[in-house]
Amino acid sequence: MTRSFARRVRRYLRDEKGTASLEFVMVAPLFFSFMFFSIELGFVTLRATMLERGLDIAVREIRLGTGSAPQHDDIKDIICDNSLIIPDCANKLRLEMVPTDLRNFTQLDPSPDCTDAADESKPLREFTPGGENQLMMLRACAKYTPIYPSQWLGRAVFKDPNGEALIVATSAFVQEPI
């Protein structure tokens, strides 16, 4: 009886059936997590790049001063028209523009104040159209919902109470004289 039991145990240990499924069970979660991380990172990069592009086009429009100085809503429209992949851009984008002195340089507040979808009456943080030959700092902050909020990158990014992450783009420029 012990001999037949020992023989069955040896035969079980030599058997290679099921090794592929065991390997799949061990590797698949890591592979899928890496795939979800890559997709999320790709979309974060795409959104950040498109926000930078929209901001650069808006800054070029302001800097060249082709007639009238664009106001807050005009700049926001230019940015949203040129950053195509940011969902609900008009409501989830917040702009801050301040004049800066070269001799006494002060940076913008390190924590950007992004728009809160729950609070529609939030006033402008600071938006001062500059004059000719004046150094200006323009910051755009957009909120988005991560594609996979429970995966690695979705958990790692800072999110507000609504579960939205933020991307920030900043640009400095000097307005050309008219």
Image: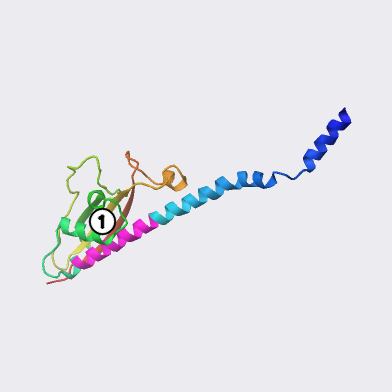
- Would residue 105 be visible to someone looking at this image? no
Q: Horizontal and vertical percent for residue 101?
A: 20, 61
Name the residue at 52% across, 48% down: 32
- In-front residue for pair 19/67: 19
At numbered mark 1, what does the secondary structure look like: helix, strand or loop?
A: strand
The amino acid beneath tag 1 is Arg
Which residue reaches farthest top?
Answer: 1
Q: Main secondary structure of the magenta part?
A: helix
Name the residue beneath numbered marker 1: 139
Q: Quadrant of residue 174?
A: bottom left
Q: Residue 108 magenta-drawn?
A: no
Q: Horizontal and vertical percent for residue 111?
A: 30, 48
- Extent of the magenta region: 44-61
Q: Horizontal and vertical percent for residue 21?
A: 65, 45
Q: Residue 45 magenta-drawn?
A: yes
Please identify the quadrant where the N terminus is shown: top right
Q: Quadrant of residue 103?
A: bottom left
Q: Horizontal and vertical percent for residue 63?
A: 19, 68
